[in-house]
Image (cartoon, rainbow, N blue to C red):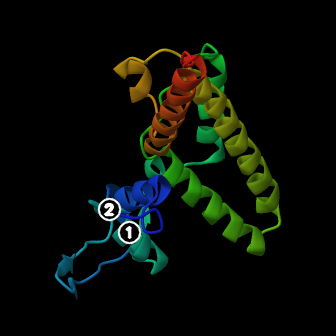
């Protein structure tokens, strides 16, 4: 078992996401690249490939490729996620993808970097962080409710992202332990 210093649900989710395949479009031809124990490419301009996110990110940084729009979050997708969450019953979570939070963190990071070069992006960044906070707060309230309620069905728990499931498990265990202690009969 790893220590809390080397592992956390957020770092674990990021690791899984970094190694998950994403779809890229190649901007220019790229020969085969040999890394320590890993071969990348060759890639042909205009073609699409599924590769791990961390490789796609490096190819994008070097101008060789770009992520498909479907792979990226944007403010419209965030607004839609918030809307879906708000129309759900107070005690029910809308389904989000297991990798929603790693995508969200990367979207906000990209947007923040763009604010340095483009003042118009500052407004978009502020709006995106506001919507992201709203999503987190609405979902957090629902997770707390679910964790303090009787045991949940698999269907309700399947709508949780990885990080949320970890939080739910911890809260549920803490709340159940507290309930047991508070309702325990005393030894008189």
Q: State the image coordinates of residue 122 (x, y, percent, origin top left).
A: 80, 61
Q: Name the residue under label 1.
A: 54
- Nearer to us in this view, 72 or 2: 2
Q: Can residue 118 be seen in this view?
A: yes
- Nearer to us in this view, 28 or 85: 85
Left or right, 87 with respect to 15, comes to: right
Q: Mark 2 points at which residue?
A: 19
Between the C-alphas of marks 1 and 2, the distance is: 6 Å
Q: Give the quarter of the image for residue 89.
A: top right
- Nearer to us in this view, 99 or 172: 172
Q: Is residue 147 visible?
A: no
SS class, disc 2: loop
Q: State the image coordinates of residue 117 (x, y, percent, origin top left).
A: 75, 74
The residue at 68%/70% (across/down) is 113
The residue at 42%/62% (across/down) is 7
- Nearer to us in this view, 56 or 37: 37
Left or right, 184 with respect to 166, comes to: right
Left or right, 31 with respect to 59, comes to: left
SS class, disc 1: helix
Q: Give the quarter of the image for residue 68.
A: bottom left
Instruction: Verify CB contact (< 8 Å) between mark 1 and mark 2.
Output: yes
Mark sitting earlier along the chain (1/2)? 2
Disc 1 residue crowd, few under 14, some 14–19, many 20+, Cα 10 Å: some
Q: State the image coordinates of residue 145 (x, y, percent, origin top left).
A: 60, 22
């Amino acid at each position: 078992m790893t220590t809390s210093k080397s592992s956390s649900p957020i770092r674990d989710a990021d690791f899984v996401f970094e190694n998950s395949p994403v779809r890229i479009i190649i901007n220019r031809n790229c020969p085969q690249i040999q890394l320590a124990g890993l071969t990348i490419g060759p890639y042909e301009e205009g073609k699409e490939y599924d590769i791990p996110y961390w490789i796609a990110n490096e190819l994008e940084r070097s101008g060789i490729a770009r992520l498909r729009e479907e792979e990226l979050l944007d403010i419209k997708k965030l607004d839609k996620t918030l809307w879906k969450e708000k129309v759900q019953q107070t005690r029910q979570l809308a389904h989000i993808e297991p990798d929603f939070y790693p995508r969200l963190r990367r979207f906000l990071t990209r947007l923040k970097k763009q604010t340095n070069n483009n003042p118009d992006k500052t407004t978009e960044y502020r709006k995106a962080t506001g919507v992201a906070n709203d999503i987190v707060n609405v979902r957090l309230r629902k997770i707390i409710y679910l964790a303090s309620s009787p045991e949940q069905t698999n269907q309700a728990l399947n709508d949780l992202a990885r990080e949320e499931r970890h939080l739910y498990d911890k809260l549920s265990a803490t709340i159940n332990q507290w309930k047991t202690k508070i309702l325990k009969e005393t030894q008189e």
